[in-house]
Image (cartoon, rainbow, N blue to C red):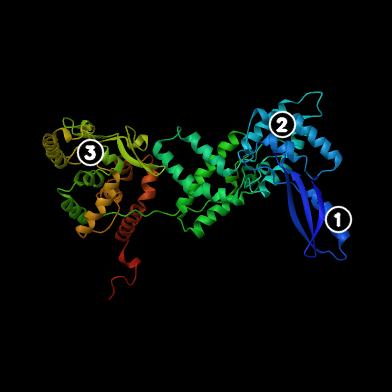
Amino acid sequence: MVAGHLREQNGIYQMILCYKDTNNKRCSKSISTGLPVKGNKKKAEALLAQTRKEFIPPIWNKDTHVHVFLVEWIQYAPLEAAEFSQYKHHINRWIVPYFKEHISSISELSVQELEQYFSSLRKADNPQIAGSQHLISTSHHILLMAFSHAVSSGWVEKNPLVSINPETGKGEILFADFILKWLAVIKYKVQITTYAGYRSNVEKRIEPYFRERGYTLNELSDNPEFIQDYYTYELEERHVKPNTVIRRHANIHKCLDYAVQLKLLKDNPADRVQRPEENTYEAQYYTNEEMVQLFKAAHGDPLEICIFLAAFYGMRRSEALGVKWSRIDMVNKTITVNHVVTDIYIDGHCQRVIKDKTKSKSSTRKLPLVPPFEAVLKYVYQKQHYQQYVCGDSYCKEYLDYINKTETGELIKPGYVTDHFQLLLKKNGLRRIRFHDLRHSCASLLYSYGVDLKAIQHWLGHSTISTTANIYTHFDYDQKINTANAMIQSLPASVFPGIGVN
C-alpha cells in the first residue's frame, strides 16, 4: 500500500499519494476527492484509505520484464494480509524462476508462452505438493489480476489470461487462429490450385469474420448457430451465391474435422448446421451458326488455336494452354490431354502452375486429330519456327514444346485468354459468353447431333456421367420434347380433340 495524506486546495480536499519508482526516486500523485473541506473530513479520510489500498503506482511500462513487474506489483496489490503472504510466496517460488529463465516483457507475453508455463506446473506435480491443479489455478488468478493492471495502463490491449482455462492451464484456441493452422497443414496435401482456392476463401472471408467475433473452437462446438450466422451473413449481407457459401462450408467442415482428429473437439459442429441449397447452374452455349461465326472471327487471331481446342475438343482453358507438340501424334492422328497451365494468386502475387496432371484422372484423355485442325497445326508449327528464326536469341526457349505461345515464344497467359476473348466477341458483334462456355457449346453440339451423354462425358473428361448430366440440364429437356413428339405421333388425332381446328 502506498503512503498518502490529505491536503486542502481551493476549499477542496486533495489526496496526495507517495511512492518510489523503479530507480528508488520519490514520486507523488494528487487526486481530488471532490469533497469541500467544511464538514467532510471523515469522508475524505475514508476515501483516502480506500484509494491508498487500491492505487497501484505507474512505475512500469510495456517493456518491463514479467518477473520484475510481478515482484514489485504484489507490494501494491489490494490484498488482505493472508492473501498477500500466500501470493508473494507463490510468485517467488513458481512464477519468478520460470520467467527469469524465459525472459519476456509485459507486452510480449503470449498465450502460447503462458501455456508453456502452466505445462511446467503440471510436470511439477509430486507427493510433496498439494497438486499441480492448485498451482495452476493460483498462478492463473495472480497473473490475471496483474495483467488487468497492464490492460488498464494501456500496455496491452487484451489480457492474455482470459484466453487460458484456469483449471487446465491450456489456451482457448480461437477458431480464426486454428483455421490458419489447418490451412498450413493441408498446403502439401492438396493440389496447389485447390490450396489457392482454400486460402483465398479462408484469408479473405472466413478468418476475418470469426476473428472479429473472437469465437473459440469450444464456443463453436457449444454454439453451432455461430457458424449458421456466418452463412446467413454471407447470403443476406454480402449477397453471395449459395454455391459460394457451400464452398466456404466445405472449408470450415474440413478444418473442424481436423480439430476432431486432434481431439480438440468431440464432434464436428459443422455437422449440426444447415448449408444452403445449391443453386442450379445453367450453362451458356453457342448454337451451330454462332460457332461458325466465331471460327471465322478467330481466324488469324492469337487465340485461334485456344478457341478451336475449347469449342471443338471441349478443353478447359488450362488444358488448351497445356497442349504440347510432343502430345500431337501425326502418325496415329491423336491429341493427348495430360498437361495443364494455369495461374493462381497467393499473397497477392500471380504464380504460374504448370504440371503433367489434369483436374482428375478422367480428364487425362486421348482425342482424334481431325484433318482441318491438323492442317492448322502444321501451319502454326512452321510459323513458330520462322518467329524463332527472326527473334534469334530474344526468342524464349523455355516453352518450345508448347503450341499456344506469343510471337516471342512466351506462354500465352491464362488471364489474357479470358480478357482477349471478350474483346474478340465485342469487336465482331458476337453474343457475350465466357471462354469456358465454349466447352459447354461443344457438348451441346455433340448432343444435338445424336452423341449420347456417356460419349460426351469421355470427350469432355468428366469424372462421372452425373457431372455431365447435371451441367447440361437442357439436354434432358430436349430429350423430353423428343419424347413428347414421339408420343403425339404414336397416338391418333382423336385423342387430342380441338387440335388443328382453326
Label 3: which residue?
410
Tell me the kind of residue under disc 3. Glu
Which residue is located at x 21 percent, y 56 percent? 290
Q: Which of the two marks, 3 or 2, is nearer to us in this view?
A: 2
Q: 467 or 170, which is in the foreground?
A: 170
**Left or right side of 56 for 481:** left
**Left or right side of 333 for 272:** right
Q: In this view, does 228 lie above or below 256?
A: below
> Percent position (x, y) of residue 213?
59, 51
Quarter that holds the C terminus:
bottom left
**In the current view of this chain or complex, which residue is farthest to the top?**
127
Q: Distance between the residues labelled 1 and 3?
A: 84 Å
Which residue is located at x 76 percent, y 45 percent? 19
Q: Which of the two marks, 1 or 3, is nearer to us in this view?
A: 1
**Label disc, if present, on residue 46 of the rendered structure:** 1
Q: In which quarter of the image is residue 122?
A: top right
Q: 208 or 337, which is in the foreground?
A: 208
Tell me the kind of residue under disc 1. Ala
Q: Is mark 1 on a helix, strand or loop?
A: helix
Label 2: which residue?
96
Q: Is residue 177 above or below residue 95?
A: below
**Left or right side of 400 for 95:** right
Q: Distance between the residues labelled 2 and 1?
A: 35 Å
**In the current view of this chain or complex, which residue is farthest to the bottom?**
502
How packed mark 1 is, by other alpha carbons closer than 10 Å (few <14, some 14-19, many 20 or more), is few
Which residue is located at x 61 percent, y 41 percent? 107
Quarter that holds the N terminus:
top right
Q: Quadrant of residue 308?
A: top left
- Mark 3 or mark 2, which has the lower sequence index? 2
